[in-house]
């Protein structure tokens, strides 16, 4: 039975060249964004013609402009800031919502100066000129925290420390995130990818998705971690003594006290969610960070009264880090699913790379 190659290529052409309704919505906003100093990728500009149809040297599977917005990101669109070429993320939000109020407050100039602030930076808030219920928050473009391997024990400690520090900052400013789970904890990977990366094919170069983007080891560059998506967050007034909430929304379904009827402490919920993230991301994935297990156990205690505050958890982490031998912190993180037979050679490669970087 022969395979219809031409037919398959034709279907690819049509499939990649057809904009979804979600994409068409963003195309309709391109001119507005351009007037505000931001531009979308060529695919999302009015009158777009697929590059593979105008240049016979480009195969459809290699074309940069074939990459569409994932359905799960319907309310998000990547863009470029015209003034400096910075990659940004535009988020469609409800105008004057609590999410906008909290996110912009945490990104205000006074709070942004605090190095403990790990809340996603807001560059702009643009009101939709056609829909009075919609605004667009322009945010730094961030990535999932595990898009690049955690290569050393120290890189794991650094991540956990920054996240706890950021949670302390949030709670000091009377904000309970309430959804600080995996998808809402992100990193600025600018230093990891010195030549940049494509916003969708994110392990490829920004303007040539046929080539892999050079990627530096996480432990060799400064990486900052951020909290994003304050869609169900609560900000209390200073001095407010009633700091209880209700509601069962959120990504982490393990939180025991969530209820639509019985009020609970959202700050202790944050501690549980972050503790659960540390468990699943690190303690259960790597063999040589078991020292974090006691911290996780406290943070995820079933009774909220038995959990530490964010500040107490950070102090516990500091005690743990002081107790760990400095050479252990520099050692390679050992994934639990790594073949034991491969571990000695991988450890040796890591050691040689550390020595090489220290010399050169």
Image (spheres, grey):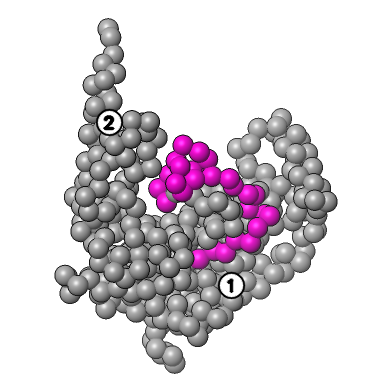
The residue lying toward the viewer, choosing from 266 and 226, is 226
Q: Residue at x 66, y 70 (%)?
A: 316
User: Which residue is the extreme one toward the bottom?
Assistant: 239
Quadrant position of the N terminus in the picture: top left
Residue indicated by mark 1: 165
Query: Is 109 contained in the magenta span?
Result: no
Q: Is residue 172 visible to us here? A: yes
Write down the quadrant of residue 323 in the picture.
bottom right
Query: Is residue 168 toward the left or the right of residue 47 in the image?
Result: right
Q: Which label is found at residue 119? A: none
Q: Residue at x 29, y 37 (%)?
A: 54
Question: Crowdedness of circle 2 by 10 Å Cα count: few (<14), some, many (20+)?
Answer: some
Q: Residue at x 58, y 53 (%)?
A: 194
The part of the chain drawn in magenta is 199-226
Q: Which percent across, then down, holds residue 63?
A: 37, 38
Query: Is 209 contained in the magenta span?
Result: yes
Q: Which percent across, then down, holds residue 42?
A: 32, 50
Q: Which percent across, then down, holds residue 173?
A: 48, 83
Helix, strand or loop at label 2? It is helix
Q: Which percent across, then down, holds residue 21?
A: 18, 50
- Residue 174, placed above or below residue 292: below
Q: Earlier in the sequence, mark 2 or mark 1?
A: 2
Q: Residue at x 45, y 61 (%)?
A: 85
The residue lying toward the viewer, choosing from 259 and 352, is 352
- Residue 60, placed above or below residue 126: above
């Amino acid at each position: 039975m022969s395979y219809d190659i031409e037919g398959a290529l034709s279907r690819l052409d049509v499939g990649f060249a057809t904009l979804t309704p979600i994409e068409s919505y963003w195309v309709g906003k391109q001119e507005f964004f351009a007037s505000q100093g931001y531009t979308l990728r060529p695919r999302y500009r009015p009158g777009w013609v697929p590059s593979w149809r105008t240049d016979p040297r480009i195969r459809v599977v290699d074309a940069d402009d074939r990459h569409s917005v994932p359905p799960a990101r319907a309310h998000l669109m990547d863009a470029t800031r015209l003034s400096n070429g910075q990659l940004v993320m535009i988020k469609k939000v409800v105008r004057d919502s609590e999410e906008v109020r909290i996110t912009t407050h945490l990104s205000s100039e006074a709070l942004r100066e605090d190095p403990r602030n790990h809340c996603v930076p807001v560059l702009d808030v643009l009101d939709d000129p056609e829909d009075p219920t919609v605004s667009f928050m322009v945010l730094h473009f961030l990535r999932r925290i595990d898009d690049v391997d955690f290569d050393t024990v120290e890189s794991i400690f650094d991540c956990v420390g920054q996240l706890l520090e950021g949670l302390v900052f949030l709670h000091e400013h009377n904000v309970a995130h309430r959804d600080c789970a995996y998808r809402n904890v992100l990193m600025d990977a600018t230093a990891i990818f010195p030549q940049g990366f494509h916003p969708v094919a994110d392990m490829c170069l920004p303007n040539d998705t046929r080539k892999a983007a050079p990627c530096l080891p996480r432990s060799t560059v400064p990486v900052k971690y951020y909290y994003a998506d304050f869609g169900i967050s609560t900000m209390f007034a200073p001095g407010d003594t009633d700091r209880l909430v209700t509601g069962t929304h959120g990504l982490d379904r393990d939180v025991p006290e969530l209820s639509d009827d019985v009020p609970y402490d959202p700050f202790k919920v944050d501690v549980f969610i972050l503790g659960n993230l540390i468990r699943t991301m690190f303690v259960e994935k790597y063999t040589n960070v078991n020292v974090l297990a006691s911290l996780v156990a406290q943070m995820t205690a079933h009774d909220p009264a038995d959990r530490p505050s964010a500040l107490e958890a950070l102090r516990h982490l500091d005690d743990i880090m002081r107790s760990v031998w400095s050479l252990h912190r520099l050692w390679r993180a050992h994934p639990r699913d790594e073949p034991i037979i491969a571990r000695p050679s991988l450890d040796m490669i890591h050691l040689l790379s550390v020595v090489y970087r220290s010399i050169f």
